[in-house]
């Protein structure tokens, strides 16, 4: 299902990673087409139990630092946590907008601007609540030889997929990050309607730490 096509040195702000490119086919999807995945790997994945995150592409958050979601901060949390731990991997998979794609995600944003939540907007557009499938990201973890991980996620679907792939989750690490008035409803909806394991407070964070992070992101 998975083939590694490239591997390069990848220096980052946090650490010197290895960046690997994979391509795979999920035979359950029709039409069958190749899907690209990236694995950002640090250290010896077998000396200690590595920290792992499966991160779904979010152009608006990861690239443009949108405050409407927590994706950008969760990605940076994973990079920082892996660097401090000394070993780990991020599997970056291209299922934008919970699988509906970038354009449809923006159409869903339009409906959210009119009052719908993220789930209601997807359904209004005729999409399932979540189209993502984690079979290929889990195959990447297996290709890396991982048998046990510390999984950084709040998403119960990712937890179930990793376990179904025969990989032991020694510990679940919280993916909670600071949030703001723009993302508060979105995060609440994920927690209340999708069962995400967030322990975030009910009120958005607008204190000095949040404002300082926003200024740094804007620089």
Image (cartoon, grey):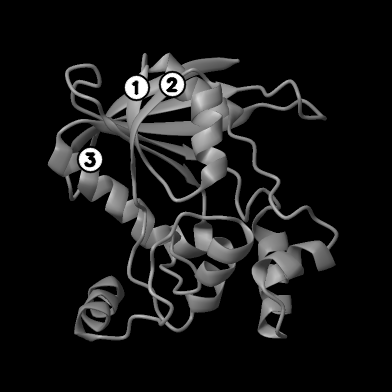
- Circle number at residue 191: none
Element type at mark 1: strand
The residue carrying pointer 3 sits among few (fewer than 14), some (14 to 19) or many (20 or more) residues within 10 Å by Cα, namely many
Give the percent coordinates (x, y) of residue 133. Answer: 64, 36
* Residue occupying image coordinates x 14% and y 43%: 84
Query: Where 143 sits versus 193, above or below?
Result: above
Q: Residues within 10 Å of mark 1 (few under 14, many from 20)?
A: many
- Going from N to C along the chain, the mark reached first, 2 or 3, is 3
Residue 90 lies, in percent from the top left, at: 37, 37
Along the viewing direction, whichever of 162 and 126 lies nearer the viewer:
162
Q: Which residue is mark 3?
A: 82
Q: Residue at x 26, y 83 (%)?
A: 211
Q: Does the image show residue 75?
A: yes
Could you say whether the residue bearing mark 2 is in a helix, strand or loop? loop
Q: In the rendered structure, are the residues bearing label 1 and label 2 in contact, judged by CB atoms less than 8 Å apart?
A: yes
Query: What residue is at 24 percent from the left and 74 percent from the top?
Result: 213
55 vs 111, left or right, is left
**Which quadrant holds residue 91?**
top left
Q: Is residue 21 above or below residue 132?
A: above
Query: Would you name the residue on which mark 2 appears?
Result: 167
Q: Position of residue 182 (x, y in %)?
A: 48, 81
134 is higher (above) or lower (below) than 125:
above
For the residues marked 1 and 3, what is the alpha-carbon distance in whole angstroms?
15 Å
Residue where numbered disc 1 is placed: 148
Q: CA distance from mark 1 to mark 2?
A: 5 Å
Q: Earlier in the sequence, mark 1 or mark 2?
A: 1
Tell which circle, 1 or 3, labels the residue nearer the N-terminal end: 3
């Amino acid at each position: 299902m998975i083939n590694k096509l490239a591997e390069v040195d990848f220096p980052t702000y946090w650490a010197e990673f290895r960046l690997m490119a994979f391509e795979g086919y999920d035979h359950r999807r029709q039409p069958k087409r190749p899907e690209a995945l990236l694995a950002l790997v640090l250290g010896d994945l077998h000396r200690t139990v590595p920290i792992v995150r499966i991160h779904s592409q979010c152009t608006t958050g990861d690239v443009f630092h949108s405050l409407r979601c927590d994706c950008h901060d969760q990605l940076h949390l994973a990079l920082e946590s892996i660097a401090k731990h000394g070993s780990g991997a991020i599997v970056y998979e291209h299922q934008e907008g919970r699988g509906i794609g970038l354009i449809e995600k923006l159409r869903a944003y339009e409906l959210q601007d009119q009052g719908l939540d993220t789930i209601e907007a997807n359904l209004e557009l005729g999409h399932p609540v979540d189209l993502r499938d984690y079979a290929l990201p889990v195959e990447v973890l297996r290709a890396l030889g991982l048998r046990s991980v510390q999984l950084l996620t709040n998403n119960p679907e990712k937890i179930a997929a990793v376990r179904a792939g025969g990989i032991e989750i020694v510990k679940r690490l919280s993916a909670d990050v600071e949030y703001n008035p723009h993302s508060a409803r979105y995060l609440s909806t994920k927690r209340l309607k999708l069962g995400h394991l967030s322990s975030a407070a009910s009120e958005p964070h607008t204190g000095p730490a949040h404002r300082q992070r926003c200024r740094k992101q804007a620089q």
